[in-house]
Image (cartoon, grey):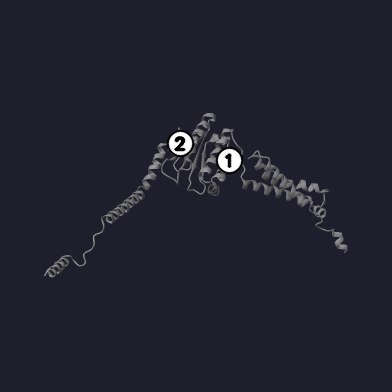
């Protein structure tokens, strides 16, 4: 009797629960799932807000840059090209240059052409005059540097100076190799140094590529001079040295104007001058006295012996 009652009770209890009722998740798992959903929703919201406000931030930056144009701030770095630790010393350097010499250098960095600050705002805010140089730096351009300068600046720095300055520091190869910051700071050091010295004929400093170019032209001048020395005397020319003098406009232009001139105008180092001079002399000797050198070293035999045998 007791056994029957217990079986009935068990069967009734099992019928009272559904056969396929889903099991409730643990409280900890449910909380972690809710937290993950909240995090993903917050991340999506922040990303959408950043994308939506990006153009507004650019426009706000340009508008803020126009309000910064004043003589107390010579450098307005909207493109963030100048390192933060160099910005304040650079501003102080330009202000000291203006106070000591009267030459005024201002620089604006920005990405692409923008509405603000306009040229009128720059002219009014910086009080641009004939002794002012305005440097524009655009990292998105193939050559990141352009210059505007007054008539007074032309008296101490030729337009060719700014062309060379732009070509040396602003070209994409130099920027790719050294970086935008190093290129801009090198350009500013060269520009301010020449203004402080009262002018420069050419941009100071001789790069490796430029020196190699002068060395090649010096060697070419030596080849021309040596070739002229090998011409046999004929007509009114009684000696070979006269041929060298007659061809001097050609080899002297290569050696003096293009081999030594760029070195003398850009550096006081003696080693480049010695190297170009030795290159010219070695090339002239190797070509002009080729037969004598070959005979002395035993590289050739006498042509008369060859014909007699």
Q: Crowding at label 1, few (<14), some or many (≥20) Cα neighbours within 10 Å? A: some
Secondary structure beneath label 2: helix
Q: Position of residue 272 (x, y in %)?
A: 67, 43
Q: Which residue in the protein does label 2 denote? A: 123
The residue positioned farthest toward the left in the image shown? 1
Labelled pair 1, 2 in contact (Cβ < 8 Å): no
The residue lying at 77 percent from left, 49 percent from top is 285
Please name whichever residue, 249 or 25, is drawn nearer the observer in this view of the structure. 25
The residue lying at 55 percent from left, 38 percent from top is 189
The residue positioned farthest toward the top in the image shown? 100
Q: Can you see residue 225?
A: no
Q: CA distance from mark 1 to mark 2?
A: 23 Å
Q: Position of residue 34 (x, y in %)?
A: 28, 54
Q: How many marks?
A: 2
Q: Position of residue 187 (x, y in %)?
A: 54, 41
Secondary structure beneath label 1: helix
The residue positioned farthest toward the right in the image shown? 308
The residue lying at 56 percent from left, 42 percent from top is 165
Q: Which residue in the protein does label 1 denote? A: 161
The residue lying at 56 percent from left, 34 percent from top is 195
Please name whichever residue, 188 or 156, is drawn nearer the observer in this view of the structure. 188
Q: Can you see residue 121?
A: yes
């Amino acid at each position: 009797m007791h056994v029957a009652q217990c079986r009935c009770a068990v069967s009734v209890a099992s019928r009272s629960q559904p056969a396929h009722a889903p099991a409730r998740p643990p409280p900890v798992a449910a909380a972690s799932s809710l937290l993950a959903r909240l995090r993903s929703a917050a991340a999506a919201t922040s990303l959408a807000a950043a994308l939506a406000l990006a153009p507004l931030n650019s426009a706000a930056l340009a508008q803020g840059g126009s309000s910064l144009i004043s003589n107390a701030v010579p450098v307005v770095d909207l493109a963030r090209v100048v390192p933060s630790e160099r910005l304040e010393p650079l501003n102080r350097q330009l202000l000291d240059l203006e106070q000591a010499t009267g030459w005024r250098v201002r620089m604006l960095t920005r990405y692409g052409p923008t509405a603000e600050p306009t040229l009128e705002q720059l002219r009014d805010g910086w009080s641009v005059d004939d002794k002012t140089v305005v440097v524009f730096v655009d990292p998105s351009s193939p050559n990141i540097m352009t210059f505007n300068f007054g008539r007074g600046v032309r008296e101490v720095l030729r337009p060719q100076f700014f062309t060379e300055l732009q070509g040396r520091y602003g070209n994409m190869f130099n920027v790719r190799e050294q970086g935008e910051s190093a290129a801009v700071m090198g350009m500013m050091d060269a520009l301010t140094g020449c203004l402080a010295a009262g002018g420069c004929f050419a941009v100071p400093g001789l790069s490796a590529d430029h020196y190699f170019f002068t060395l090649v032209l010096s060697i070419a001048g030596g080849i021309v001079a040596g070739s002229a020395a090998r011409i046999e005397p004929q007509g009114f020319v009684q000696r070979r040295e006269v041929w060298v003098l007659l061809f001097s406009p050609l080899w002297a232009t290569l050696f003096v104007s293009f081999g030594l001139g760029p070195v003398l105008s850009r550096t006081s180092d003696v080693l480049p001058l010695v190297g170009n001079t030795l290159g010219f002399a070695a090339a002239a000797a190797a070509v002009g006295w080729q037969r004598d050198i070959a005979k002395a070293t035993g590289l050739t035999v006498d042509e008369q012996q060859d014909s007699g045998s």
